[in-house]
Image (spheres, helix red, strand yellow):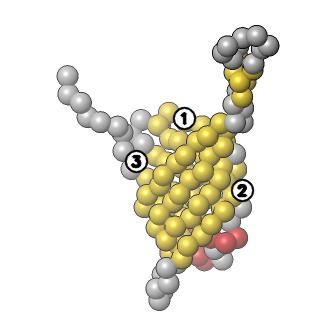
Amino acid sequence: MEVTGFPTSCDIYLELDGKKVAVVQSYTAKATKSSQVVEAFGESEPVATINGQSKYVLELTRLYATDEAISDGIDFFSLADFSLVICKPDRKVIYSGCQWSAIQEEGKVGAMVAEKVTLMATNRIEVTA
């Protein structure tokens, strides 16, 4: 049996209203959940856990606006309620309801590039490719 590792991302991009507005070189994703334990009087261990809300924080590196987004006048600071789409060989991972929380730029003449963007998403789904 050959071990091939994890499927890698072949395309990562931001989508707004069904249009690809930026391509992304790389990302890191962190998911947390605000779960709680239920304690009962006299018990030495919790008797249950309550599933809490999920929170998704994503760090994107090197974003390039598409030519269409630039011609439409879209910039990274005006983006709201967009999606991050990560295409893998066997599925797509989509983070939706995204809002940015930090943008770090690197200035170069003639380039519409954001070096790092931190965003938060309200939902994460996986669909088969």
Give the distance between the C-alpha atoms of the residues marked 2 and 1, in whole angstroms. Answer: 20 Å
Reply above or below: 103 against 124.
Answer: below
Q: Quadrant of residue 39?
A: top right
Sequence-wise first label, 2 or 3: 3
**Is residue 106 shown left or right of residue 80?**
left
Q: Quadrant of residue 122?
A: top right
Q: Which residue lies under the disc numbered 1?
A: 127
Q: Which residue lies under the disc numbered 2?
A: 81
Give neighbour class at mark 1: few <14, some 14-19, many 20+ (Cα, 10 Å). Answer: few
Sequence-wise first label, 2 or 1: 2
Q: Are marks 3 and 1 in contact (CB under 8 Å)?
A: no
Quick one: SS at disc 1? Answer: strand
Q: Quadrant of the N terminus?
A: top left
Quick one: which residue is furthest to the bottom in this view?
A: 109
Give the distance between the C-alpha atoms of the residues marked 3 and 1, in whole angstroms. Answer: 14 Å
Q: Give x and y (percent) for residue 114.
A: 53, 72
Reply above or below: 27 against 47.
Answer: below
Q: Which residue lies under the disc numbered 3?
A: 9
The kind of residue tagged 1 is Val
